[in-house]
Amino acid sequence: MKKEKKIAFLLISFILIHLLLIVYSNRGKFTEKFDPVYWKDKYEHSQWTLPQSKRVLGDEGLYIYVGYLLSHGANPTLLNAEAPPLAKYLLGLTIRIFNNPYIFGFISSSFALLAFFIFCRILTRSLMISSMATTLFATDPLFSDQFSQAMLDSSYLLFLFLLFCVFVVLARTSQKKGPLYYAAVGGLLLGLLSEIKFPLLSPVLAFLFLFILWRKRNFKAILLFLIFSFAGYLIPYLTYFMQGHSFKGWIQSQKWTVNFWVVDYSVEKTFGSAITTILAGMQQNLVTRNWDKVMYWNWGWPFVLILGIIGLLKTIGKEHKEKIIWLIIFIFTSVSLVSVNILPFRTRYLLPIIPFLYLGLAMFIPRLKSPILIATFYIFILATGWFTSVKIIFPTPEADLKEIVYEWQNGFFQDIYERTTAGTKAKISRDKFHELGFRRYQEAQIDTVAIEQINQEFPRFKSPQSVNLEVTYVTRDLGFFQEHPRLTFIKEKGQWRFEWQWNLLAENLSENDHFETTVNYAKRGTIYDSGGKKVAYDFPSFLVLITPSEVDKDKEKEMLGFLEGIFKKRLSDFRIHLKYVGNNLPDEQVSIAVIPRMLNQTELNKIKNYPGIFLEDHPERFGKTKDAGTFRLSNGKVVECCYLLYSTTSYNGTSGPEKEFNDILKGINGGRLTIYDPQGKVVRNILEVAKKDGADVNLPYAIDLEILNKSNE
């Protein structure tokens, strides 16, 4: 007995050390102040508000901001209603208390871990087995990652383990009134559990609980369980009802949620992806459908799955007097495992399954009988999980670099700012940082940015460390230029941050410098048929620009519909809207597209009458193929394709005579891209291009104009 207590003490001490490592590594994250202005801006410009927005806000960010709004009285049926609100309310409460969302992850995960230990202790009555299972679960990389994330999963686990505690006590009780108390508590926990994540497994849990009550022939307890389950399900909506909303409205919101997951949720299923994740560490991506490596995988997982199931099955054996309890655990684990293998799968969906597999493994290991074999095997499973967890707890800057590259490519300087060092933030505000960065893009007429990392390894514990990048900027009219910045990462309070200098955007650029672009438009050669008739040629048109702050909201829908027609529906109204509201400076003009045809005077007058629209003279191509050309780098990589900002410099024919005679037809715009200092002195000439008109082509055979234009329909 003393030996078991010593082992349990060592294991619990190991858990505490593990938690201290998590706190130390995330000390910067746990002390970061919540900024509602930033999160509001990111949410309102993300895909949750603007469909197909490139400023992606992940589930964690969504829960953080929605939780904050709910804690300030927002309607839970109108914000992220597909996910029940209880955990988001708790997250919002954490933000109000600590002014930090990530502490919620640590608190909920810690309580979930404690609840799992209590459940194992009540179930097995063995301090050592409970400590063994809890230590394996605590150091599992998937669960370890939850301590620093503001997600819903740990809250779900907390209520799940508490419910299973009630399962065990209820199954063992022989008192007449006991089932009534446990039915009420169990029902309340099930109702609350169902309001954390979509209650896919709640019917299974309800059936298992009712099965125990039915075996006791206690029908009052069954009724009480159902009543309290419904009460628990309603509790998170008390604020909703107190605000005057009706029960009918609540029912409609529940119907919408069910319809969302059952009918509208369009993500393709990934059959068997959960099994391959556990056994081989490979998972099918829900978007690309490619098979990706799972960062949480370790060599222990296959053993945990197989031996965990065997351990549960062995314990269900006839010799065990409480096999009904273990049978319930096995049924829940099996149903959960099957469900995640036939539905769209994410790795975190394994969280309700893994702890029960660790419990089964802890029950199996003592059957090895040999103390040396038991210790060796347990240490192997523990070590494989813990070493993988250490990689999660102390990451390299590689993941941060990927985020920075994405934000850099899309001009999300307000998000880049969040990843800069404290020294950078002390010198400049987020708004000013975004304004300067985005304005530099506009001045240089940057349409597309492609960034590639030069071969680089990322040491885990070295700070500072640098990475070399190759940045290709594609301008609207003057082609492209390349820069080769060196990004330096520094660890601040456990978080990777990088030092920002404006010469990272372009060599010799400083904070007070600016770009100037001058363009002398060239023309692409004209194609004539054998009769001397023009079949493809440049003509004078207009570039449409919109100033977001000047748009008349009352006429906006009409304006977007008119523009969609002008652009021949090749640019839909919501895409036009996304272009000028997605990422911009409210008082700066945003380039939308070049009008692909000649406008009559009525159309011209109408478009000019919409507030916020400005027309700039710009050439366009008549008779071009459906794709508006492709811009390729010297290595053949497509940087920009099929957009409606025609330029002879970037346009390459994609079919027919436009493609066949592309080298002859192609023109090159002339102009300069220059960096100037505040006094107007030239700092650097980045691009200086001589104008070159393309040559005309006379086709040696007749081409019917109607046939040529079919490709443009």
Image (cartoon, rainbow, N blue to C red):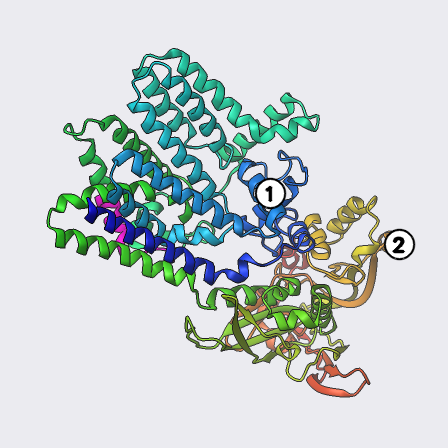
The magenta span reads: 295-307
Q: Quadrant of residue 444?
A: bottom right
Magenta span: predominant SS is helix
Residue type at mark 2: give it: Asn
Element type at marker 1?
helix
Which residue appears at 19% of the width and 49% of the height?
3
Question: Which class describes the residues within 10 Å of circle 2: few (<14), some (14-19), or many (20+)?
Answer: few
User: Horizontal and vertical percent for residue 657?
Assistant: 60, 68
Mark 2–mark 1 contact, CB under 8 Å?
Answer: no
CA distance for labels 2 and 1: 54 Å
Please give the label number shown on residue 503: none
Q: Is residue 235 left or right of residue 163?
A: right
Asked whether 623 or 596 is in front, the reply is 596
Q: Residue at x 64, y 36 (%)?
A: 78
Q: Which residue is mark 1?
A: 93
| Residue 605's disc number | 2
Q: Quadrant of residue 323?
A: top left
Which picture quadrant has residue 632? bottom right
Q: Residue furthest left?
A: 370
Residue 552 pos. (x, y %): 84, 49
